[in-house]
Amino acid sequence: MRLLLVEDDNTLRAQLHRALGLAGYAVDQADNGRDALFLGDTEAYDAVILDLGLPALDGLSVLKHWREHNRRHPVLILTARDSWSEKVAGIDAGADDYLTKPFHTEELLARIRALLRRATGQASPVLRCGALTLDTRTGRVALNDQAVSLTSHEYKVLAYLMHRPDAVVSRSELTEHIYAQDFDRDSNTIEVFVGRLRKKLPPQTIQTVRGLGYRLTAP
């Protein structure tokens, strides 16, 4: 799952970038509103973390632009401690959730997980496909309650598919959503990751839909 992190405080942005990366997300960064607006318009994100107090262009203006141009990615806004008016304005402008500074990183991660679940119609933090489970809180993947060991990229591919059970996902879509912008993307490696996953999962869990992509189904 791919996120955009927009925060002008260098220290906080670095801390969040590290925490999100360790949680298994591909993360792009911006430190001003102008760059954030461009990235949100041109790149595919599963969710955005958006500080409202940004240089060049404030976060509220960025959010309003996205919603006016039908950018549907879920947005979690970051607001100052006592700025209740910012919270109201952010929600009215189309934000999906907000978090008040200072905050615990664990709370931010939990809110992002909830946004991603809601965006894909999932209710539980534990995603299921037959006997296969993926706990979004811990990153643990299990088959018949036995842990399945995955590399980071195998996990990212599986997590994206698990959020979209029975949907056909193209190779290009997977490429867009498991790599950050500055990563040397190669869509051919998706086939490699899918091939490795198939060796660790029951037959026909990941099906190839000829000419279209892949579909995760319970065998």
Image (spheres, rainbow, N blue to C red):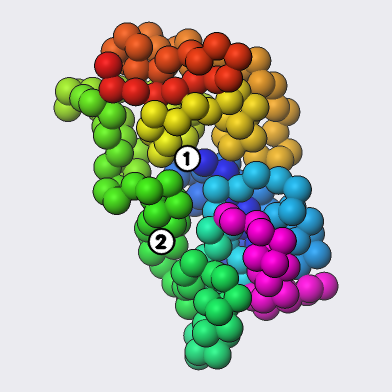
Secondary structure of the residue carrying numbered label 2: helix
Mark drawn on residue 178: none
Q: Residue at x 32, y 9 (%)?
A: 203
Q: Give the quarter of the image for residue 11.
A: bottom right
Residue lying at 70% horizontally and 33% vertically, measured from the top left? 183
Q: First in sequence, mark 1 or 2: give its number.
A: 1
Task: Check if residue 56 falls in the magenta segment.
Answer: yes
Give the x, y percent position of residue 150.
39, 23
Residues drawn in magenta: 52-73
Q: Residues within 10 Å of mark 2 (few under 14, many from 20)?
A: some
**Residue type, mark 1 in image:** Gly
**Residue type at tag 2:** Arg
183 and 12: which is toward the camera:
183
Image coords of residue 105 (percent x, y):
44, 62
Query: Image point 57% across, 34% down: which residue?
Result: 178
Q: Is residue 199 left or right of residue 188?
A: left
Q: Position of residue 39 (x, y in %)?
A: 74, 53
**Can residue 14 be seen by looking at this rendering?**
no
Residue ID for mark 2: 111
Residue position marked by numbered label 1 in the rendering: 24
Q: How far apart in space, not on screen, are marks 1 and 2 (Cα)?
A: 15 Å
Between 133 and 215, which is closer to the camera in this rendering?
215
Find residue 204 and report its horizontal and vertical position in percent. 35, 12
Residue 184 quadrant: top right
**Above or below, 102 relative to 180:** below
Give me the residue at 58% from left, 25% from top: 170
| Circle 1 or circle 2, nearest the eye | 2
Q: Residue 123: in sight, yes or no?
A: yes
